[in-house]
Image (spheres, rainbow, N blue to C red):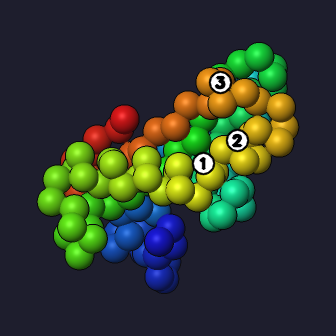
Amino acid sequence: MDTGTGLLGFLTEPERFYHGFVLGMVVNMADTYIVRSNRESGYGRYDVMPEPVDKNGKAFIFEFKVLDPDEDELTLEDTLAAAHRQINEKKYEAELVSRGFSPEKIHRYGFAFRGKECLIG
């Protein structure tokens, strides 16, 4: 879930806070990247997708996940693996492939969170 409730929803929805934080950082790359967020691609909606203006550059897919013990996630590594499974199973790269990017130019990153802890890979 990427949305909180009410004005201070980001305090109760850490995924939304981190999404906004990372999105804010990558928007600074606007001269070399087109940064898209929460758009449909493949069979779902990715979180953030920086696409290089130069089609020879590296494209990225970012998926944010908060550790969820109800999904058998006991460690941040488990949550990171869940983020990668989601990227692959939902084929988030479809939008980039349709724009002419080869799969080896597409880098997939999961962001796993638990409170103030974060694991990226």
- Image point 55% across, 31% down: which residue? 107
Q: Are marks 2 and 3 in contact (CB under 8 Å)?
A: no
Task: Say whether residue 19 is visible.
Answer: no
Q: Nearer the viewer, residue 67 or 100?
A: 100
**First of labels 2, 3 by sequence position:** 2
Left or right: where does residue 46 sit relative to residue 14? Answer: right
Give residue 10's quadrant in the image: bottom left
Residue found at x 48% / y 83%:
6
Q: Quick one: SS at disc 3?
A: helix
Which residue appears farthest toward the top when viewing the image? 56
Circle 2 or circle 3, nearest the eye: 3
**From the viewer's perspective, is 116 left or right of 92?**
left
Residue under label 3: 105
**Residue drawn at 62 percent across, 52 percent down:** 91
Dot 3 crowding, Cα within 10 Å, few <14, some 14–19, many 20+:
some
Q: Which residue is mark 2?
A: 35
In percent of width and height, residue 70 lies at 23, 76
Amino acid on which the number 1 mark rests in the picture: Val
Marks 2 and 1 close (CB-CB < 8 Å): yes
Q: Amino acid at mark 3?
A: Lys
Q: Secondary structure at mark 1?
A: strand
Amino acid type indicated by mark 2: Val
